[in-house]
Structure formats: C-alpha cells, structure tokens
Amino acid sequence: MGSQSAPPKANQDDYKLKDTKPVLGERWPHGGQRGGSGWIYTERATSTYDLVEQMFYLYVRVEKAKDLPPNQVTGSVDPYVEVKVGNYKGKTRHFEKKSNPEWKQVFAFSKDKIQSSVVEVYVRDKEMVARDDYIGKVVFDMHEVPTRVPPDSPLAPQWYRLEGRRGEPKVRGEIMLAVWMGTQADEAFPEAWHSDSASVHGEGVYTIRSKVYVNPKLWYVRVNVIEAQDIEPQDKSQPPQAFVKAQVGQQVLKTKLSPTKTPNPMWNEDLVFVAAEPFEEQLVITVENKSTPAKDEVVGRLCVPLNKFEVRLDHRPVHSRWFNLERFGFGVLEGDKRHELKFSSRIHLRVCLEGAYHVLDESTMYISDTRPTARQLWKQPIGILEVGILSAQGLQPMKTNEGKSSTDAYCVAKYGQKWVRTRTITESFNPKWNEQYTWEVYDPCTVITLGVFDNCHLGGGSGSKNDSRIGKVRIRLSTLEMDRIYTNSYPLLVLSPKGLKKMGEVQLAIRFTCLSLAHIIYLYGHPLLPKMHYLHPFTVNQLDGLRYQAMNIVAVRLGRAEPPLRKEVVEYMLDVDSHIWSLRRSKANFFRIVSLFSGAISMTRWLGEVQQWKNPITTILVHVLFFILICYPELILPTIFLYMFLIGIWNFRFRPRHPPHMDTKLSWAEAAHSDELDEEFDTFPTSKAQDVVKMRYDRLRSVAGRIQTVVGDIATQGERLQALLSWRDPRATSLFVIFCLIAAVALYITPFKMVSVVAGIFWLRHPKFRSKLPSLPSNFFKRLPSRADGML
C-alpha cells in the first residue's frame, strides 16, 4: 500500500479558495448609475440582480406578421423570420401556407460580441428545393435602439412595413417587432434564443435554457399490519402460516412469518414507504401462505389508492380499518365469482401519510431542508439566501466534437425544495452565467450544494450519454456572517480512478440576510429535524432504505421536466454513493478523529511537563492555582467557564474569513494511491478481475485485523474494571475490597480539602521523588483477568 508523491506547491495552492472582486450591481449607460457608485447597498429593493455582473443584451421580439404577399408560382407563402446582427443569425420556425403568422419569439444577442451597427430582420418564404425567397426586411440603427430599465413594463411591439432589397417600401406586408437593449434581469431572458448558443439546433435548444425546478412533495407512508382473519389456503388440510407483502411503486416490504400456523394470524408490524405527490401508485397488499419452504401461495389481495388514507400531523395514532381481501386464483373468465362469495378473508390495517416527518432525500451531514412534509406545520422563514452564479474559469475539455475539444457548461444549485439550473454556455472554457437566485431559509444549520456539469445533449458530437461532472461546492449557511457579500472563486475538484484533478474554478457571490435574529437564536436550542423523528424514530437501516427510495423518486420526477434534470445530475448533487466503502474516506475519518483528540493529547503532554518540572516557574504557578482552588472550591466552575470565554475571545482574531470549501488534505485525496481510488469507483458488486479482488480482500483483512485488535484491547480494559469486584481473581478482589474499606474510613475522618492537597502535592512531586517504574495502581490493574482467556 504505497502512496503517491505529494503534488507540487503550486498545485496545492490551486486547490484553495480565492478572493475575487467582481463588479456587482447594476450600471446603466444612460440615466446615470443606480445605487451608490453603481452598487446596490441599502436601496436593495431597487434591484434583484445585485450579486452578479451586469451583462447587456440586444433583444429582438418577433411577434407576428400580416398581409404577406404570396409566392407567384405556388400562390401561397411559408414564412419565417431571420434576425441578423453581424455574424450571428437567429431563425424562427416556419409556417406552411400562412400569410398572417404569429411567432412570439425573442432573440438575445450579447452586446460584447456585437460587431455591427445595424439590426436586420428578414422575412423569407421557405422553399423545399430552391433558395428561400426574399419577402422583405426591416433595418434598425443600433444607436437608436432604446434601453429598457427594469422594473419598467415591457416595450410595446410596433408594426413595421417591410422594405425591399434597396430599402424601398413594399406594397404589401407588415411585421410586428420590439427591439431594445436590456440585461439578464429582463423577463424575456430565460426563454430567449441566445447568440451564445447559436450552434444548437432542434431539440437541443430546450436543454440549454435556465430553469427552476421544485422538488416533488415526499411523504412517508406508514402501513401498520395488525392482523388478518379467515385466511384460507389452497390446501385446507393444513392451517396457513401467513405473511403480508406490501408494495408501493417499486418498493416491496414484507412482514415476518406468523409465529404459529393459524387462519387468524397476528403481526403488528410497521412497514414504511416513500411516495410523492401527485400519488401515481397504489398500496398493494397481498397475504401469502408459506405452503412449503420453497413456495409461497397468494391467498388474498388488496389495492387502495394512497389519497384514500388519513394524514397524521402528530404522534397520535390514526384509526385502524378492516379491509376485505380479494380471493386470488380466479381466471379472467371467472372474475365474477369474486362477488358471489358469501365469505371473505379480512385484514386489519392502520395506514397513514406521515405529515410530521421530514422525508430525507439527502444525507443529514449536508441537509438543506428540515421542514416537515405538511405545510401547516411550517414555521416562518428566518432569513433569505441569495446566490449569484457568476462564471467559471479554466474549465477542462470534456468532449470532442468534430475533432475539436469543447465544454458546454451549466451550473445546478440545490437548497431546500428548490433546484435551479443556469443556461448552458456552449463551446467555452470560461463561461459567464451571471444569474442570481433566491431561497427562503428556515434553518441556518443547512447546506447549499452547487455542481457544474457538461451538457452532453445538445445534438451531434461524440459525447457520452450522461452529463459529465465538472465539480461540486458545498457551503454551510451557519458559517456565513449575516448581510455580508462573499465573492470567492471555488476550486472544482473531481476524484477519478486516475487521481485528483482540478477541473477549473467557479465564481460565486453569496449573501445570507437575517430576517429574525431572535428566531435564529431560538432555533439553536431546538432539534434539527421535526420532533416526530425523536418521538417515533426510524431505525438506521430503515432510514438508509427510505433515503435511497426518496432519491430515486426525486431523480425520476425531475427527469420528467423540460428540460430534464437528469438522473446522474440529481444523484451527484444528493451524494447517492456516500455510503460506499472507500479506504481513502476511512483514512480521512480516522485522521479527523486523531485531530479531535489532538487538543487533549497536547493538554496531557503539558501536564506531564508540569509534573516533571520541565519549567519550574510554570509548575510553581500551577501549585499556587491548585492551592487557591482547594481553598475556594466554589471558584472551580467559574474559572473553567472564564477560561473558555477568554479562549473564545482570543480566537476571534483568527476566525475563518471565508466559507468552507472542498479540502483535499482533509479528504486525503492528494496522497490516495491509484489502486485505492480504483477500488472506490468500482461497481457494486465488483466488476474487477479475480486476482485484483483477492488483493483488495487481503488488504481489507489486514486493515480490519488492526481495528479488531484495538476493539479487543478496549474490551479487555473494560473487563478488567468489572473484574475488580467480580471475584474472578479472588486475591485481587480481596485486596481491592479491603482497600475500599480502609479508604472509606480514612476519607470519612479526613477533611476533603486535606485529601485533595495531599493528592495534588503527591501528583506534582519533583522527579527526584519519582520512580521510573510503573505505579502501583497501574501494576495492579494490568494484572487483573479479562475474558480474552476464554476466546477461541
């Protein structure tokens, strides 16, 4: 198990957070600057785009045309509009045989890339074989285009008469247009055709737009299977030994077998599922009989829509109900016999939709929402989170298209119930999004996750079918100062079987605004999750299974949106593989524990130096403090708390100035061996060759052997403590019991302060009065027996 050499110093610096100073806020070329010096400070209500750099766009809205002249040959017209600004062209769809078409489409051209002084709008007639016919045009001077300043109302479109090729007015044909200069704050921006993505055609156009998605509303469905009556097996000579199988969608759970063979079995077991609104699945209950060890026969079935069940908002149980089971085994032609039965098996259920739980679809370590499912149980928000997704720098090529390397990057952010996706900037290694989003915050101890991906669904190219990961950033809100704007460049780091790789940097601007400081302070004393998680908790195994099902449901539902938020994106954002075994993660967690105890180890070391009189002045001062505390024991607790207060005030000068980011050293990513990473990214079950699996298994055995030894040593020390009074070693227990009696009498007649002074002086005695051999209590304890002798 070797380790790779550490990367050079320059690379290590690249993995760190960097400060940036982008020009945020709105600056308008006409009418002066808005806000103080172009910034939006106190007058924040004037702009909702004060955390991004302003980007100017030329907008052309093509509404409709009328009275278009027909083609002299065909006698009809198949019109479409082409908007041309310099080298950029945008086209509307064409209509067949329509002289009064309506397009209602907006084109946006980035001002930074405009190299023309005119905007040309052409109306053409689509031809199947020959060149498209020219119908007319309208030309606008760029200098005469008005600037629209939000929150002004949209610019009203106007009718313009079409001109000929030489600028002469046409006899027939008019087009309704609106042309203006605006920013990304314009309402037309999200749905507009963008010159930045002019190379995207067809269905790919829908995958590049910015969108906001809402998480499906998830519920826990609790099915309490109580009992059944009159279960009839096919073989009536043997009483049934039944169990119940419940299914919601793809989730299937079973009760235990009835302990006795009886037609009236009892289980009283809870089965918990995850379901999402609108409820598309039904609860399917089947009662099955274990007729032979290898065969289960269905003896009854029940289907109930989920919206028929009661919603539970607290710990009080809902009413139970009896349900008649449909007999199983009738053919299609015999279906009517079910209704002729005078006698039916029944099952007793208590089913409810749990509204007082929060359905966990992400790890509690990076949780972004803690509210219960039922909206009526929500509290008021305590703050506002605003995130400006500015740009990315130095992205790596992700795919090859026609021999040319390219990256089509977009960013996804997830917090609470709201997912956002920026537009895709095509063929750029330094994309600029400059999009701002806002979330309500209900708990400050939550995490926002942002991921950058490469869009592989633009049509054409040799890219993979899945959108590729470029990197991820997590930011815990409680680490942010309130009402401060953080502008930083975060490294985008990805681990792969080949090792750690920096894929680029993403620049963000973040502000957490407090609405109620009193409410935030109140929350710090309350549980993170709703109280039902503590009154009626789920088991660890239940929570793992339910979280996996919830993530699947979220991925499926968001994958149905247009454009879809794809499964691989959702799984990466929700850390679907965080539970998979990784030697690298195990090392990282071990060293996290070591660092936790580093303070206690340092304190122990310092006390040892005091005890050994390494610095006589320090030891004398400790003697003085010790005697003061013995004389005035009421000062002990105030001294401890005052000491912690002073440490906190001292550390305020060295407080972190930046939000946390992905730490390569903490993650043990820089020194991870290539084989360890290859194992971490292996499939489950493994797909590696037998000799590789054998080597990894042996390595895992060696690591587990060390852990086994440590656990055994801890058990041995605990059993030695028990052996003090268990008479396992009669002589040792006799000595200890006699010592306890003498100590009890001595401590009873001796003042406690005197005992403390003697013990303290003895512990702090000079090294001249110490022996290098172990102490008497240590020798006595190590001689006590443990149960290790009885281990095979």
Image (spheres, grey):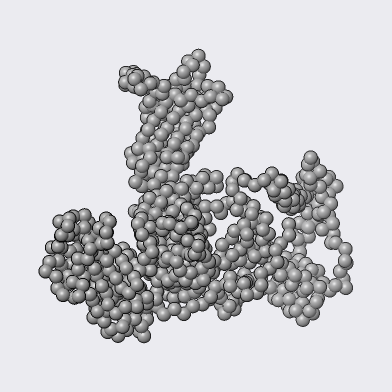
| Viewer-side residue, 449 vs 688 | 688
The C terminus: image quadrant: top right
* Residue at x-position 48% and y-position 24%: 297
Left or right of 173, for residue 402: right
Residue located at (59% from left, 58% from top): 496
**Which residue is nearer to you in this view: 97 or 565?**
97
Residue 131 image-quadrant placement: bottom left
From this viewpoint, is residue 527 visible? Answer: no
| Residue 154 located left or right of residue 422 | left
Q: Which residue is drawn at 73% across and 60% down?
A: 2
- Asked if residue 458 shows in the view, the reply is yes
- Residue 268 x %, y %: 48, 34
Judge from the rendering whether residue 772 lies leftward or rightward of residue 45; answer left or right: right
Query: As drawn, which residue projects farthest toward the top?
Result: 237
Numbered marks: total: 0
Give residue 181's position: percent from left, percent from top: 28, 76
Q: Residue at x 32, y 68 (%)?
A: 89
Q: Position of residue 367 (x, y in %)?
A: 48, 58
Q: In this view, does 700 lie above or below 474?
A: above
Q: Which of 151 and 406 is in front in this view?
A: 406
Q: Quadrant of the N terminus?
A: bottom right
Image location of residue 168, percent across then percent down:
16, 75
Residue 697 higher or lower than 750, as above or below: above
